[in-house]
Image: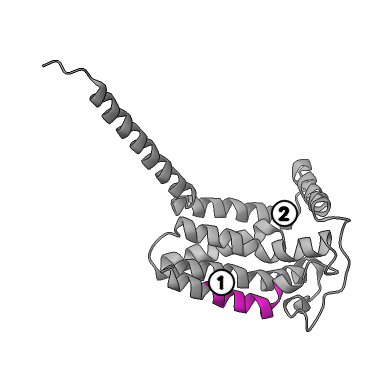
Amino acid sequence: MWPWEHLIVSYILYSLISHTVFRESPSGLDALAVVLASVLPDLIDKPLAWEYGIFDVGYAIGHSIFFAVPLAILVGMIANVTARPRTSLAFGLSYLLHPPADIIDAVFRQGVLLIDLAFWPVTLVEGHPPGPSFFEAVFLLFGHYTSDLLAGNLSAYLRIQVGLAGFTILVWLLDGAPVLRECLQVSTRAVGVVMERHTNSSSQNQPNRW
């Protein structure tokens, strides 16, 4: 499953939970947690396999429930201490969704049941790295994907994927564009502070006419 597909699934589900349970849009911190956690298993396993050769394929410790569940619990404990329980939910949900999403994707696209990928090191996924290095593998795989898009060779799967991406962007905008919203708020406050200081400085430098 492509990284943005994981992000799409995680953000739509968390946004739905946020609105139905908390009656609010996701915050910027929650959205960042979704982005990071939804792709973190790949950021752990792919470089270790493709770049450093520690694993044969990019499904290992990062995708394992023996690592994912303790990590989600640890993040939850830290988030609760810092009074960020929703961020904990966003992270845990997005991370724990990643392995089953890969399993379901393999069933639909390849016709194979890769349930083994969630139980490393008890079970191992057989295979070999797709290229000599992580970045070369990324460019190779992403290049094939983008070439199909640019050439207009859209399969039914790609059409659904593009449609879901557009729907996710719409949901994000209706949520108030979290992350971007907070960045604009910080920028507005910073500009306001600078303008206020400039105004105060200008008024103090005015000559006393009396």
* Depicted 150 relative to depicted 25: above or below: above
Judge whether 191 appears above or below 62 on screen. Answer: above
Question: Residue 92 shows which numbered tag?
Answer: 1
Q: Residue at horizontal 79%, vertical 66%? A: 58
Does the magenta run of residues contain 73? yes
> In the picture, which quadrant includes the N terminus?
bottom right
- Separation (CA) of disc 2 from disc 1: 28 Å
Q: Position of residue 77 (x, y in %)?
A: 50, 76
Question: What segment is highlighted magenta in the picture?
Answer: 63-75
Residue 123 horizontal/vertical position (percent): 80, 82
Q: Which kind of residue does numbered mark 2 sit on?
A: Leu
Q: Position of residue 191 (x, y in %)?
A: 38, 36
Amino acid type, mark 1 = Gly
Earlier residue among tags 2 and 1: 1
The crowding category of the residue bearing disc 2, from other C-alpha atoms within 10 Å (few below 14, some 14 to 19, many at least 20), is some
Residue 158: which numbered mark, if any?
2
Residue 197 appears in the picture as rendered: yes
Number of disc labels: 2
